[in-house]
Amino acid sequence: METERTLSAAQVLSPTQPMNEPARRRVNPSNEEFGTNDFRLLIGGKLVEGAGTLDVINPATGRVLTTAPRADRGQLEQAVAAAKAAFPSWAATPLRVRGGLLVKLADALEAAQSEFARLLTQEQGKPLPQAQWEIHWAIGTLRYFAALDLPPVVLKEDATQKVVRLHKPLGVVAAITPWNLPLLVMVIKVAPALLAGNAVVAKPAPTTPLTALKFGELCARILPPGVVNIIVDQNDLGTALTTHPDVAMVAFTGSTATGKKVMACAAGTIKRLTLELGGNDAAIVLEDADPKEVAPKIFAAATLLSGQACIAIKRLYVHDSIYDAVCDELCRLAQTTVVGDGLEEDTQMGPIQNHTQFEKVKAFLEDARRNGKIVAGGEAVNGKGFFVRPTIVRDISDDSRLVREEQFGPVLPVMRFANIDDAIARANDTEYGLGSSVWSSDRERAFQVATRINSGMVWVNKHLDVGPDIPFIGAKQSGMGAELGQEGLEAFTQATIINMAK
């Protein structure tokens, strides 16, 4: 179906269409302010105030956008208890009925997509077209999972026996989500969990809780009480949630460092886990690639969400024969990118999402200045907000921080190579293994290179091409388990083998 496919990063960003800086105006100008009661937690089917509140900052201004309700330990316990109580009847509900309710959620989100997109830009910072892309993606993901099934599979049948595999729901699922794609990543976890028959306690990132809470309003209207619960914390309830004895599974997206803590917390009761963690994605450009053709696509994949994407290109290895040409093209693209408030209609790249990450990215800029040659960008934008100009760094060593670590910002190191075996070895020399890409005019040769890269996902002549029907898989310390696709649905189930004698 049409909704199963989504726009690529390059289609969303269109960096090859530079815009002039002066012509700035807001989309649907508004001076709206949010009241303290505009957002509520969802616990047991009821929209409730939090035990406390927390400030939500607009990263484009650095000022408080609104306050959000903040749960305490008691409300976490209520949420888990509500999910546990709702689970038996939800699990007994026919799968097609559960899928029908996912369709209703998709319809409701689609009807409110303009409101959601604008709110998403205000809390996260991304340009409005990218926010619209995220909402579209979330709608398509709900519809995709709503159409899937978990039928019994006959593994073996002969004159003496019949062996059948079933997939059963697990119970209460904790869904812990990040601040870069706050609504989409929640839907990626909630949709398959619900279709499989589980109940959910979702915990969005404290810097981007608003669209998740608004999604909770839709859930309260459409789903049975307790099937979905949404709480917000100040990063102080994660341990209680992931060690809770009534939580059967944790689905987590975030940094590798935090993922390790989640894994340790889950060990006490051997909870099921999906971990989608950090990445230091490498792209390799072979000597037969056309710099003018590949540079815009690479730049788009490196700067989507201001570089704050786990599968953004984080390292670029370019053959020596076209190294200068590729660097020049990337430099031109960086210099013509319009950086600004995501509600300004000509903005192509928004701010860093929060002050903590902003300071981390600035530290990477200092490392780039010491260990490489900055040919574009290289500085934070003075004034309000958390803005960093897209930065291209050439002639930098592989042992610099910018190359070794995940920068999660719009700072791209470009290294040269002369031998493809050397390039592959350097691309693989990392504890991460989320995504990577190979660029060449010879598709078969590029495929052969791709088979030698140790990543869960490898693209050829593109990057960031994902969809709800394609499994999202990390290798090494970039995660475990699968999200999306049939595999992503089955990850929220317990397989059971029934072996019958005849």
Image (spheres, helix red, strand yellow):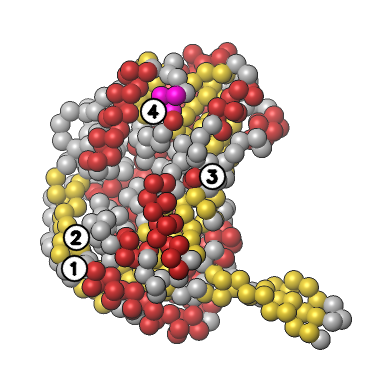
Which circle marks residue 493 in the picture?
none
Mark 3, secondary structure of its residue: helix
Estimate the spatial distance between the alpha carbons at disc 4 and disc 1, rounded to whole Å.
Answer: 40 Å
Q: Which residue is mark 3?
A: 476
Estimate the spatial distance between the alpha carbons at disc 4 and disc 3, rounded to whole Å.
Answer: 20 Å
Position of 279 relative to 225 (above/below): above
- Examine the image and state in which quarter residue 182 appears: bottom left
**Which residue is at the far front?**
268
Q: Residues within 10 Å of mark 2 (few under 14, many from 20)?
A: many
| Total tally of numbered discs in the picture | 4
Tell me residue 474's x, y (percent): 53, 47
Q: Which residue is mark 4?
A: 401
User: Is 276 within the magenta?
Assistant: no
**What is the magenta segment's predominant secondary structure?**
helix
Residue lying at 14% horizontally and 45% vertically, measured from the top left: 63
Q: Quick one: label 2 or label 1, which is nearer the N terminus?
A: 1
Q: Which residues are magenta?
A: 399-403
Q: Amino acid at mark 3?
A: Lys
Q: Quick one: label 3 or label 1, which is nearer the N terminus?
A: 1
Estimate the spatial distance between the alpha carbons at disc 3 and disc 2, rounded to whole Å.
Answer: 36 Å
- The quadrant of the picture occupied by the C terminus is bottom right
**Which residue is at the far right?**
159
Nearer the camera: disc 2 or disc 1: 1
Which circle marks residue 68 in the picture?
2
